[in-house]
Amino acid sequence: MALTGFDPKWKDFPDYIIGITREIWEERNIHTLHHYYANDIVVRSPGSVVVGNTGVIGATMATLAEFPDRQLLGRDVIWCQNADGSLLSSHRIVSTATHTGSGMYGQATGVALRYRIIADCAARANVIDDEWLIRDQGAIVRQMGWDAQTFARDLIDREGGPEHCVKPYTPANDQPGPYTSAGNDHEAGQRYADILNRIMQADMAAIPKEYDRACYLELPGGIDDIGHAPADTFWMGLRAALPSATFTIHHVMGCSDDGLPNRAAIRWSLHGKHDGWGAFGQPTGAEVFVLGISHAEFGPWGLRFESTVIDDTAIWKQIVLQEG
């Protein structure tokens, strides 16, 4: 597909997404964010909402100061084009980095890390103008010897306490952006959306019915596993912790590319009370907003690959701020 309005050096949209990521982070062309990112871009991550490319540049430099050897290895780009000409990519990444500088994660530890990221980026005419970004922060802090709850409490203190700390992303502090599409109607995306809706409606039998029994799973916290049981454990634990929360699919797309299986990417949320025993321990009654992005691949025996990213530390930060 020809990219109208994009630099001709990019052969297609996945090439553009992977290429600018490498340019910015690994080739140190951080200044290119001035033209690759819109001046008023909104970047939402579970831990914060950043408005404007100046803030994105500052955050990028702070991360590289703490992890100077960081690499972002693109695993897949699931994408679609909308009727208005805008495009959306859901870019799944494995990042490697060594914690050799002090910063958000505390004093330098020298720990070598590997963790997952999924970024949904909306673009038009060579410019990204809207973004949703989730890092598996739970995996990062666990490799450094923290648990997610303790890290969240410590971060609140280091950011100046409950009144002054950076507030996690919720609908209350969201900012509108130009990308308003809900995705496409590709069969893989619709199939995966149906599976997740069934699971969130407590139809846990959807997992043995729809997942390949040898499905490979990438789960939050840096967990890799295989089969129905770990899929059930993750989704059950998350839903059990928030049994009355509202599950919403915000963006769903399927994709077929030469040489690749049918894939799907879904951005979703759970919003409501932490009123159940599950992944976050004793119920607290705190209002929690969980932002998630999930990728899936389908084969002849059903869903054969699933990768989900949420940020446990941002969930705990919301709980701790309300608990006191």
Image: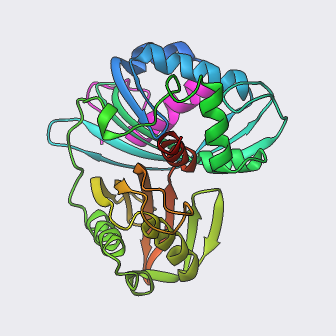
The x, y position of residue 51, in whole percent, is: 38, 21
Give whichever of 314, 39 is nearer the camera: 314
The x, y position of residue 135, in whole percent, is: 55, 43
Image vertical order of residue 225 relative to residue 163, above or below? below
Image vertical order of residue 114 relative to residue 276, above or below? above
**Magenta-colored span:** 1-28
Identity of the residue furthest to the left in this view:
83
- Quarter of the image with the N terminus is top left
Is 175 situated left or right of 261 in this image?
Answer: left
Scheme of colours in the image: rainbow
The x, y position of residue 289, in whole percent, is: 39, 48
Kindly tell me whether residue 24 is visible in this rendering.
Answer: yes
**Residue 296 figure quarter:** bottom left
Image vertical order of residue 285 relative to residue 7, above or below? below
Kindly tell me whether residue 28 is visible in this rendering.
Answer: no
Residue at 52 percent of width and 17 percent of height: 57
Give whichever of 12, 192 is nearer the camera: 192
**Residue 25 figure quarter:** top right
The x, y position of residue 174, in whole percent, is: 31, 33
The answer to whether residue 6 is magenta is yes
Residue at 35 percent of width and 27 percent of height: 42
**Residue 153 figure quarter:** top right
